[in-house]
Image (cartoon, grey):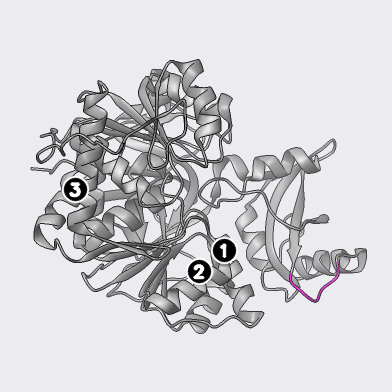
Amino acid sequence: MTRPLAAVLADTAARRPDAPALVFEDTTVDYRLLWERARVCAAGLRRHGVRPGDRVALLLCNSPHFPVVHFGALALGAVVVPVNTQLRADEIEFVLTDSGARALVCDTATVEEGAKAAEAAGAALFTAGAEHPPARRLDPPDPAPPVHGHHAAAPDDVAAILYTSGTTGRPKGAVLTHRNIVTNIEVTAVSPFAVRPDDVLLCCLPLSHTFGQTCVMSTAFHVGARVVLTERFAAREALDLMARHGCTVFMGVPTMYHALLEAVADGAPAPRLDRAYSGGSALAVSVLERVREVFGCQVYEGYGLTETSPCVAYNQPGTEPRPGTVGTPVAGVEVAVARADLEGRVELLPRGEVGEAVVRGHNVMSGYLGLPEETAAVLVDGWFRTGDLGVLEPDGCLRLVDRKKDVVLRGGYNVYPREVEEVLLRHPAVGLTAVVGLPDDRLGEEVCAIVVVRPGFAEEPGLAAELVDWCRNRLASYKYPRHVEFARTLPTGPSGKVLKRRLVQLYS
């Protein structure tokens, strides 16, 4: 029977009480103290009227406050609603109102926006840490005695409501059960992450997002490993922390790997890692190869979604990684490819054909909160429709082609941006790139590449023409970009994924 999510921390605190759980700045917190603080937090929430089943929103930056409140709310039997700390008051208010949150917990960096949202939504406002009126402190000088143990949540009780990034409209709340999240943690801790108690994981990913929250924090806590936590990602600081603390594992998104490689090329030392994991969006094969060379470790690329708790498939230790693919499904999960043009039913395609990736297993959400039509559109015939296009290779590895909504339709031909991006990233001047389709009166859409150049190269028309020729010589005539635009940065969401919808708006 599946444990409650709170037990992921509670069981390890009982088994390895003196082992370091978190390192943040100059402070180390062991498992005993972390679980005790979580239980004190649970007592504080209960004293202010929060009950099992109530929704508690977390507007917290990366610090020890996040796991304390996260597991404290879960210990009480509440449902956690993590909120992206980059959101503004109106956006936070939407999440609070949509989820029916009874309470919002902020820290000093987020309380100003959080207070406006909480007042508008009618949610109680608390801070973790310093006093900051009008919020009440969850850990005052005279805290309530810690709760004993944790609430005995059932496997199919709701554990968390995680909101999608909302790139195609209002964010949707993915409803995840204890079974969804705990099973994903227990399965992926064995493979692909292969976490050991002596591992040290650097966490630069936002804990408000499922990648950092589940894959790094909770997987490490399940095993009893150590997490070195940073408030935000900065490449040189990350390299320094990995060297100083002897980190063995790094998990990140492609934009982070690019920044780490650039920092090393600029003279920063490169620590040696045992293994690295990439997710969130496609990692170019050329970047993967450079990471493997610079950090001396194997790089495992995988695939997950907020709606799937999150892990679906990964290149996994024990088998030779397949660069350019996201590997095979994690244990207990099935992946297939279905016709992308069919609505209302799932028709599976044979291996080798491009279609929409569909998933079923213990990891699939129960639905979108309060959105029966949207839920019915993605939970079809027992499968979850991901919206991602892919192909199953003969050996069962999944190769993602692109987001269904990101495919460029040029003159009746499908152009998959990832394929063009892979070619561009082989050019020595290209550091980052995103390929999008811009409206075109004659062809419907035209292929456009937005490029961030590497140091030492100039953003000039000559380079743009060179990049067009570079692609023309390597791609079919309908695929290569006719337009190249230069940018200093690419807009990214909370997980580090490039926001292509925003690029289309900017350059149309």
Amino acid type at mark 2: Ala
Callout 3 secondary element: helix
The vertical placement of 175 against 270, above or below, is above
Which residue was labeled with disc 1?
234
Residue 410 in view, yes or no = no
The verdict on residue 301 being magenta is: no
Callout 2 secondary element: helix
Which residue was labeled with disc 2?
238
Q: Is residue 418 left or right of residue 126?
A: right
The verdict on residue 456 being magenta is: yes
The part of the chain drawn in magenta is 454-458
Q: Earlier in the sequence, mark 3 or mark 2?
A: 3
Q: Quadrant of residue 307?
A: top left
Q: Quadrant of residue 168?
A: top right
Amino acid type at mark 1: Ala
Q: Earlier in the sequence, mark 3 or mark 1?
A: 3
Instruction: State which mark lies toward you, 3 or 2.
Output: 3
State if disc 1 and disc 2 touch (CB < 8 Å). yes
Q: Identify the residue at horizontal 16%, vertical 40% (top origin).
A: 4
Q: Identify the residue at horizontal 32%, vertical 44% (top origin).
A: 309
Which residue was labeled with disc 3?
36
Q: Where's residue 261, x and y in %?
A: 59, 74
The vertical placement of 228 against 87, above or below, is below
